[in-house]
Amino acid sequence: MSGLLTEAFLSSLLTGAIVAAIPMLLAGLGEQMSEKAGVLNIGIEGMMLMGAYLGFFVAYETSSLWMGFLGGMLGGALVAVVMAVLCVWLGLNQIVIGIGLTLGAEGLTALLHHFQFSRTYPRLPAPERLDIPGLTDLPVIGPSLFGRHLIVYLAVLAVIVLAALYRRTNLGMTLRAAGERPAALDVAGGNVLGIRVVAVLFTGAMAGLGGAYLANIGAGLFIPFMTGGAGFIGIVLAMLARGRPLWVLIGALIFGAALSLTTALQVAGSNIPTDVIQMLPFAAVMLVLVLFGRRAKLPSALAASYERGAR
Amino acid sequence: MTQAADNRTDLSPETGAGIIGVHHVTKRFPGVIAVNDVSLTIHPGEVHVLLGENGAGKSTLVGILAGLQEPDEGHLTLNGRQTRLASPADSLEAGISTVFQHSMLVPTLTVLENLTLGAPWYQRPPRARIEARMAELQREFALSLPLDAVTGELSLGQQQQIEIARALLRDSRVLILDEATSMLTPQGAQELGARMQKLVQSGLAVIFITHKLAEAYRFGHRISVLKQGALAGQMGPEQLGAMTEDQAVDEIVRLMFGRESGAGTAEQRQSSARDETLLRVEGLSTQGDADVLGLADVSLSLRAGEILGVAGIDGNGQKQLAEALAGQRPLTAGRVELEGADITGASVAQRRRRGLRYLTDDRLEEGSIAAFPISENTVLKDIGQPPFWVNGVERPSRIAQHARDLIAKFNVYTPGETTPIGRLSGGNIQKVLLGRELSGEARVVVFNKPTYGLDLQNIEASRRRIAEIAGRGMGVILISTDLDELMALSDRIAVMEGGRIRGVVKNDGSGEALRLRIGRMMAGEEEREEQPAPDERKETTA
């Protein structure tokens, strides 16, 4: 095994972990807000995929990654608008609608991609990196941690911003109240449906951004169905994180590492069968669920639509 | 109490000049008129008590004032001007704060957060300002709260203080307290009473909703009694001030439980009771919790052919008693004997096979499966049993035949036995359930509010059936909140209050006097007259 612990192996493991973690982190942070507000957003996979598609398309057309990210957020938010209308305003079943949105977005993005690019998969140029003088030159961790695109640092910054928002502002309190006991928020003069709509749209935007990262930075191209369950892992992360953004980050890094281990092991030329290696991330999900799943603490009113005065 | 009486004298209510006016308000829900043409005036400096049984419309009226519901007819006025309260935010804006029957706090938030709930999202929680105000409130009203404690970990009394504090922090002019003492200890209720007096002295109007008569008199300056959604009567400060507590309570009992003029007089049924004791219940107790009252030491006996009525304001343990008898609720103590055999440990199915049947008041949720056809609902309690199941295989034709017989025998109005039961009217569902419970060898039938929510015709039919059942020698326990029904059908009436039997009275046909006596016990007032007659005592403790 000592042959595995080379600089190249570790560096590619770490790099891969971060690249794989960022979409899940963004999706998980988004899902977390929506769950706090009482909306279980199963459509997040679809929002991510729509973000990936629109993000790639905009970046490809404008040759600007930042415009691409914006497009991705818009794409995710567009799917979220449907969720907000159906599940928050009209009070339809969040699970059914969520599954529907995911399936719908999968089909729609595949169709749009086919319509536009037929069977070609054009690539974006490699993204510019934000080199931090000194730090980037460190061995192993230098290039993997400090030579990333600016969006990576913004995603980590979002963890801190969200943590402060949940803890220290009325907005965070309103979100928690909407998910825990919406009737109490309502009679206190708060706007339950309003805050839930905001949370769902935020989830869509974050998931869309995660999708755009996956397409534009992670892969450099769009392939139908490319999210491959990253959104669902985001749901798992949000549920296990017990409302703490930092735990979403930690969880995302663990899953990211498991994912990148598959690549890294293949790069290192280990003689473990590829099929077994590719099972790793999923085994990791199951392991974490078995170990920590019971400790997941969910808001009381999660997945329950709110209607004033209903008994 | 004396404090309230003192206040009463120095209050000079300006009639007509209320903060809130309720004008001919009517609110309908599907199948029910919850509030029927009610008019009230709420005055500053007064504790206005709204008194009434469950279902009398108190909570709906609170909902209307709190902006949760809007009236179908009539309107509200605020300081004499017509107003609409279309949302809780509107109601708060108008200076009305409500402490609901069920806590409206978020248990996972801290006290401070709950106090600021509903504030604009862009603001920072104004900790310093709230701390200063809380210090004031502590001086004025003895409200002291740990601001950083997690709300769900505090006692119910403290949680209620949070809600009152929240109302005061908002500078409300009207405070509504819905069933505010139901969760409190007697001590806590006393403190709340004193606090209300201080609040009205500072110029607020307090609307205090309760179904406890003594509290109404002790805390209230003005009492309005609601009955079946309508205003049954009102007592102003002068009137109350001139009365002793006993006189006031008598008057309230008359308003709450008295017979409405014009209502048809139900003929009292001829007793068919025999000597043989069918069911004997001794010292029955169940576990209670915050939501469900426990039973405490309930003893009863029931003879063949007898109807034992169980009276009480809804939610005083009647349902728990029925469930405990049916075996659906675990006992902490006590003994149940059916025809001399101990069935205390028997399961629901065993009791049913022995002939103890229970007709639930929750016809749609507990009594039937709405989407299933009538036929399957008729055998719901016999699943797997012959003749409807043979060796685990369902026999649809036998079930269908059984259902058709039942439909014919009980005059169920339905297109056929394959119709989902949920499509039937309440009365017809009731007939199906009754048919189900009476099939086979029924010995004792426990009815829980059998006529609740039925139309007049079905009520009559149901009562006839109940009398018939007793006439055939079965024992009937008839739980009802309708005193007229109990007095028309029962041989004896047991009165439940707070999970206990307050007393068992013989339905001796003494009419109004008996009604008032039962009403008093229902309200938790101790018997002031003689104790239950010796023969009855012997019966219940034997």
Image (cartoon, coloured by chain):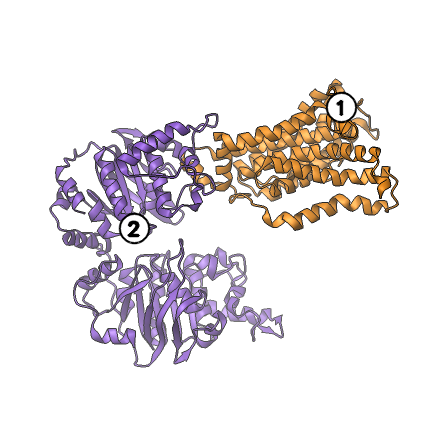
Judge depth for marks 1 and 2 and give the one in front. Answer: 1
Task: Tell me residue B303's x, y (percent).
Answer: 32, 77
Q: Residue at x 36, y 35 (%)?
A: B166
Chain of the residue under label 2: B
Q: Residue at x 71, y 26 (%)?
A: A55
Taking depth in this image into account, of B383 and B457 the one nearest to the observer is B383
Q: Amino acid at mark 2?
A: Gln
Numbered tag placed on residue B228 in the rendering: 2
Q: Residue at x 46, y 26 (%)?
A: B124
In the image, the chain rendered in orange is A
Give me the C-alpha separation between circle 1 and circle 2.
78 Å
Residue B227 visible in the picture: no
Q: Amino acid at mark 1?
A: Thr
Judged left or right of residue B350, residue A26 is right
Residue A20 visible in the picture: yes
Q: Label 1, on which residue?
A: A136
Task: Tell me residue B39's x, y (percent).
Answer: 25, 40
Q: Quadrant of residue B178?
A: top left
Residue at the left extreme, as displayed: B242
Q: Quarter of the image for the C terminus of chain B: give it.
A: bottom left
- The colour chain B appears in is purple
Judged left or right of residue A112, residue B502 is left
